[in-house]
Image: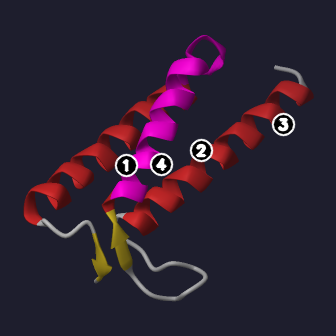
Amino acid sequence: MNEQVKYHDLLFINLIKTFELSANVSLGLIEDPVSKSKKMDLQQAKYYIDLLEMLKARTKKNNSDEIERYLKEMILQLQMKYIELTSNNTDKKGEI
């Protein structure tokens, strides 16, 4: 694997991690790095999960097996947490 491909893989992983972090903040699982508080916004969380699914689908043939596996498992975990929270919470926004 050449250096440019490795660099592009790192950039893609950083993009994925950015959306993963945003989804986790929106799910209220971790503190927002800016406001330093936990808030849940399930509509925003769904948006980030959908973005990750779209990236996975649009880049499928270009990703390494490791990246594919990571995306699949990470999206599944986010979806499961989203389902758990939506079934337990009628209010889609709020402080935790």
The answer for how far apart the CA atoms under marks 2 and 3 are is 14 Å
Query: Residue 26 vs residue 89: left or right?
Result: right
Check disc 4 and report its element: helix, strand or loop. Answer: helix
Residue at 45% in and 32% down:
53
The first of marks 3 and 1 along the sequence is 3
Residue occupying the far left of the picture: 88
Q: Earlier in the sequence, mark 3 or mark 4?
A: 3
The residue that mark 2 highlights is 16
**Mark 2: which amino acid?**
Ile
- Dot 2 and dot 1 residues touching (CB under 8 Å): no
Q: What element carries label 2?
A: helix
> Residue 12: x and y, percent?
70, 38
Q: In this view, does 75 lie above or below 17?
A: above
As drawn, the label of residue 46 is: 1
Q: Which residue is drawn at 66% across and 15% down?
A: 62
Relative image position of residue 69 (x, y in whole percent): 45, 29
Circle 3 — which element? helix
Q: What residue type is labelled 4?
A: Tyr
Sequence-earlier tag: 2 or 1 = 2
Residue 73 highlighted magenta (yes or no): no
* Labels 4 & 1 near each other (Cβ < 8 A): yes
Q: Is residue 85 visible?
A: yes
Q: Position of residue 43 (x, y in %)?
A: 35, 56
- Residue of label 4: 48
Disc 3/disc 4 C-alpha distance (Å): 24 Å
Q: Where is residue 96 in the image (x, y as percent from the top left)?
A: 28, 83
Can residue 28 be seen by looking at this rendering?
no
Residue on which disc 3 sits: 7
Is residue 5 shown above or below 84?
Answer: above
Q: In which quarter of the image is the N terminus?
A: top right
Q: What residue range appears in magenta?
A: 43-65
